[in-house]
Image (cartoon, coloured by chain):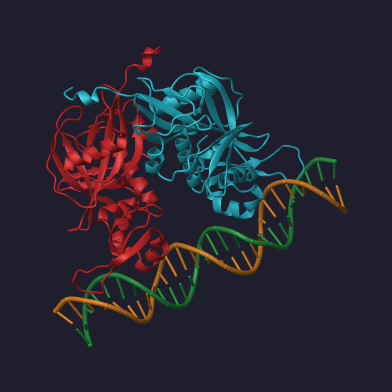
Chain colours: A red, B cyan, C orange, D green
DNA sequence: AAAATAGTGTCTTTCAGACATTATCAC
DNA sequence: GTGATAATGTCTGAAAGACACTATTTT
């Protein structure tokens, strides 16, 4: 190798935004962990792992899910978000992050895993204006307010308290939420958190969460008309409860 | 470091899909280089560079443009495409590629740069069915036919002749073309290849290229109605030629 | 004036949203 | 039956597409 400048390679971090759905409260959840070691020890953060030599980034993202939660998933549930490479994004040495999103078909219980002091499902919510936030009891984290990558990193170096997520994770999370919201009308993979099949009501619940509006505000008839090309009917609910049974759908794009 | 598996880090390659527009022929162009060294020596490929320690991936993509073409651009013209990390994507050692797209406001002449035997602008074209290809004289490269990453890499290991691009570049190129096509109706950054401002006719030419249809097939009145929210009027053409002078527009999202 | 080019206007069809009605369940 | 839930149908307004017309230029 003739160029010494390219010899010094950064470690490659996989950052995974893991989504699930709480059927008790009908709310979307995101996994956050409390970091055990520096940098950003004691800060809450998105779960991360280092990429290994013989695996692809997709595989590393799935391995992270398995290690943190103990779930083995097919790669259909994981998709690439973006890559974050800004020089100032981590203190000290250079850190490069490949961000992925995983949509769990259930909401398994959590225990703090390796490298973490704590781990919890945080409840996702949004405002009508397009702000997103994660909440667990008293803990409350907002996504970044900047509208562009440029303006975000320009103001990034200033000291940040424990009410911020570690690193640039508030920015990564914002990019993730916006991506999901943008794809709701043509590739709503986020609905995978509802499991193999779902009712239109459940789907509208997820949509409403991203729009920051109540479910009631999304008309079922119109929703079906505009989105049925994305869904495939697979039966009817069998649960015994009051009211007419709802039909079940699955994502048309997902093979069995 | 306690885990030996993560010590062996791959080199990080920046792959850049560089677009321009030939005003002589009114055709979109993509830059390809003929590789001087292995792997894939003598194959045509998308231009690449190794990432350096003290730069971000965006900076590396811009540096590549400067080295290959001698143009210094603002980062508004470069955007992230995706990251390609599949284990089999390069023979021998593991190679990780961060792919970017750059839209040049002009079409500068080329000379084969460092690491390349040859370099040319290839003419972009598409079929109505959504196939894309690049052509320069007798050379003709098609984008991958697979519809998913999974099926592409499943068939990737078989030997491929010189009528294929190097590595998985036919797949990367397909992802790029599809991304641009998908964004035509809400963020048509590809129009930056037309320079600072452009006429509606020129814009329709670019759109028609991606749809694989003649410009005539896109009605000017309807096009203006459905896309004017993306454009901002900035004057009128001054060139002396037959017919009513066309109005000039620029992308509304791009600041001066 | 003619030809060429481009901007503007109008009609029709299509689709999204508001709202009303019908269907099926538990009690 | 009643009340609850969900599916289905209808009406209206907005937007997209087909097409006609007007405007400005060079020759």
Quarter of image, res B119: top right
Residue drawn where x is 60% and y is 38% of the image? B197
Up the image or down, A184 lies above or below B48; here it is: below
Task: Please name the residue shown 41% across and 53% down the image.
Answer: A186
Depth order, front residue of A199/C6: A199
* Res. B192 in view: yes
As displayed, is residue A144 above or below residue A85?
below
Instruction: Please indicate whether residue A93 sits to the left or right of residue C6 in the image.
Output: left
Q: How many marks?
A: 0
Q: Which is nearer the eye, B41 or B19?
A: B41
> Where does residue B121 sit, x and y in percent of width and height?
59, 29
Asked whether residue A166 is in view, the answer is no
Q: Along the line of sight, which residue is nearer the eye, C8 or B48?
A: B48
Q: Nearer the viewer, residue A8 or B115?
A: B115
* The furthest residue to the front: B159
Question: Is A137 placed above or below A159 here?
Answer: below
**Percent from the top left, x then y, of residue A101?**
30, 43
Location of residue D22 by image quarter: bottom right
The spot of residue B51 in percent (x, y) is 39, 23
| Image quarter (top left, top right, bottom left or bottom right) of the N terminus of chain B | top left
Residue at (16%, 44%) from the top-left corner?
A120
Q: Position of residue A195 (x, y in %)?
A: 25, 55
The quarter of the displayed image where residue B242 is located: top right
Q: Is residue A46 left or right of residue B26?
A: left
């Amino acid at each position: 190798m003739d160029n010494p400048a390219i010899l010094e390679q950064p470690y490659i971090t996989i950052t995974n935004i893991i989504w699930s759905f709480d059927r008790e409260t009908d709310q979307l959840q995101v996994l956050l962990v409390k970091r055990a070691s520096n940098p950003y020890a004691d800060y809450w953060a998105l779960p991360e792992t280092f990429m290994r030599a013989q695996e692809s980034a997709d595989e590393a993202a799935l391995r992270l899910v398995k290690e943190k939660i103990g779930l083995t998933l097919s790669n259909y549930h994981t998709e690439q978000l973006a890559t974050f490479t800004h020089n100032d994004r981590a203190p000290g040495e250079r850190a490069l992050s490949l961000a992925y999103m995983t949509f769990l078909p259930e909401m398994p219980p959590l225990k703090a895993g390796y490298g973490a002091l704590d781990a919890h499902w945080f409840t996702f919510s949004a405002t009508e204006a397009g702000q997103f936030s994660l909440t667990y009891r008293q803990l409350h984290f907002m996504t970044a307010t900047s509208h562009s990558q440029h303006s975000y990193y320009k103001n990034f170096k200033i000291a940040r308290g424990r009410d911020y997520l570690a690193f640039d994770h508030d920015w990564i999370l914002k990019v993730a939420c916006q991506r999901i919201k943008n794809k709701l009308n043509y590739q709503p993979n986020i609905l995978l958190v509802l499991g193999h099949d779902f009712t239109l009501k459940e789907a509208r619940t997820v949509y409403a969460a991203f729009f920051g509006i109540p479910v009631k505000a999304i008309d079922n008839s119109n929703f079906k008309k505009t989105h049925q090309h994305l869904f495939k009917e697979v039966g009817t609910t069998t649960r015994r409860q009051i009211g007419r049974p709802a039909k079940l759908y699955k994502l048309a794009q997902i093979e069995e």
